[in-house]
């Protein structure tokens, strides 16, 4: 149905990775539940910030992240030069 992962970037920052919900299950709140689980895992790892990247054409994902309290930030690292990347951050 849905999946996601988290990795530590440094002692205070985690990154949400590989969030995905199968097309037949979208619009049922599964993505929101996966995101809550990712946030909990990031907190357990000691992170105080959670960042993520998505594509500019992923409007449903962008809406999900905004509704979950994420704020758009400048992309950095491997995403800095990508014109199709949108990056977000949430203080945990």
Image (cartoon, rainbow, N blue to C red):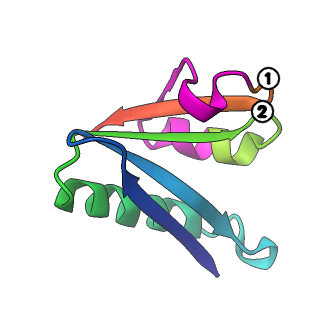
Q: Give the magenta-colored segment's residue range.
A: 63-81
Q: Are marks 1 and 2 in contact (CB under 8 Å)?
A: yes
> Which element type, helix, strand or loop, lies under badge 1?
loop
- State left or right for residue 35 relative to residue 61: left
Work out whether residue 68 can be spotted: yes
Give me the residue at 16% from left, 51% from top.
Answer: 46
Q: Where 80 falls versus 48 (above or below)?
A: above
Q: Quadrant of residue 75?
A: top right
From the image, tell me which residue sits under label 1.
Answer: 83
For the residue pair 43 and 9, the one nearer the viewer reads as: 9
- State left or right for residue 80 relative to residue 10: right
Where residue 47 sits: x, y (%)? 23, 46
Where residue 92 sits: x, y (%)? 25, 41
The magenta stretch spans residue 20: no
Q: Where 79 falls versus 50 (above or below)?
A: above
Q: Quadrant of residue 87?
A: top right
Where residue 90 sits: x, y (%)? 37, 35
Work out whether residue 29 can be spotted: no
Give me the residue at 60% from left, 61% from top.
Answer: 18
Is tag 1's residue or tag 2's residue first in the polypeptide sequence? 2
From the image, tell me which residue sits under label 2.
Answer: 56
Q: Where 3 falls versus 7 (above or below)?
A: below
> Which element type, helix, strand or loop, lies under badge 2?
loop
Disc number placed over residue 16 in the picture, else none: none
Give me the residue at 44% from left, 43% from top.
Answer: 68
């Amino acid at each position: 149905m849905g999946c996601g992962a988290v990795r530590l970037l440094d002692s205070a920052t985690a990154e949400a990775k590989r969030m995905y919900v199968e097309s037949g299950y979208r619009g049922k709140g599964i993505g929101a539940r996966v995101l809550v689980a990712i946030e909990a895992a990031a907190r357990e790892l000691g992170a105080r910030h959670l960042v993520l990247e998505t594509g500019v054409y992923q409007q449903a994902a962008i809406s999900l992240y905004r509704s979950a309290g994420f704020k758009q930030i400048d992309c950095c690292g491997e995403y800095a030069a990508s014109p199709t990347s949108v990056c977000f951050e949430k203080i945990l």
